[in-house]
Amino acid sequence: MRKRSGVVIVQNGQVALIERVRNGRVYYVVPGGNMEPGETPEETAVREAYEELGLRVRLEWRAATITYRDSIQYYFVASITGGDFGKGIGPEMLGQYPPERGTYRAVWLPVQDLSRREVMPRSIAEALIRGDLAEPVSTTEE
């Protein structure tokens, strides 16, 4: 089973997301990625925040554990400690993936807009909309 970690960063009523455009479809994902050998979920979340968003972060708490298909995903609420938003150095952010993988762009999206956008994982978006991400979310998504 694959393991992934991501970060949920909310600032001034907006959440940091990755805007994906692929095959004409626009959707948003919580920044994160696969755990590398020897990494903890926390280390993965911190690394992915830097690679995808260009931000140094401090993890506050684990907000969710989600089972999705063949993966377990850990999501952490994080606060920004440094860096430059939108300056991620990961290959996807630098346009180094083949064109069929689509595009990736770091964006701030108002929390109030999450109900009108396709945001994944959906349980994280719904918790943000409700304003209750302080309570851990544990779910299986389809």
Image (cartoon, helix red, strand yellow):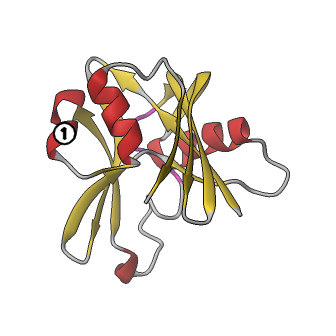
Q: In the image, is residue 85 part of the stretch drawn in magenta?
A: yes
Can I make out residue 88 in this image?
no
- In front here: 55 or 71? 71
Say whether residue 58 is left or right of residue 134: right
The answer to whether 17 appears left or right of 13 in the picture is right
| Relative height, residue 81 to residue 56 (above, below) | above
Q: Which residue is found at the position 14% from the left and 44% from the top?
A: 116
Screen quadrant of the C terminus:
bottom left
Magenta-colored span: 84-89
Q: Quadrant of residue 36?
A: bottom right
- Residue 81's quadrant in the figure? top right
Above or below, 43 relative to 38: above
| Percent position of residue 139, x then y | 51, 43
Q: Quadrant of the N terminus?
A: bottom right
| Chief secondary structure of the magenta portion | loop
Q: Is residue 53 visible?
A: yes
The residue drawn where x is 47% and y is 72% is 96
> What SS does tag 1 mark?
helix
**In the displayed structure image, the side of residue 6 where residue 122 appears, left or right:** left
Tell me which residue sits at (39%, 76%) in the image.
Answer: 101
Q: Residues within 10 Å of mark 1 (few under 14, many from 20)?
A: few
Q: Nearer the viewer, residue 131 or 50?
A: 131
Residue 102 placement (x, y as % from top left)? 33, 72
Residue 114 counted in the magenta span: no
Tag 1: amino acid? Ser
Instruction: Give residue 64's position: percent from left, percent from top.
Output: 55, 34
User: What residue is shown with label 1?
Assistant: 115
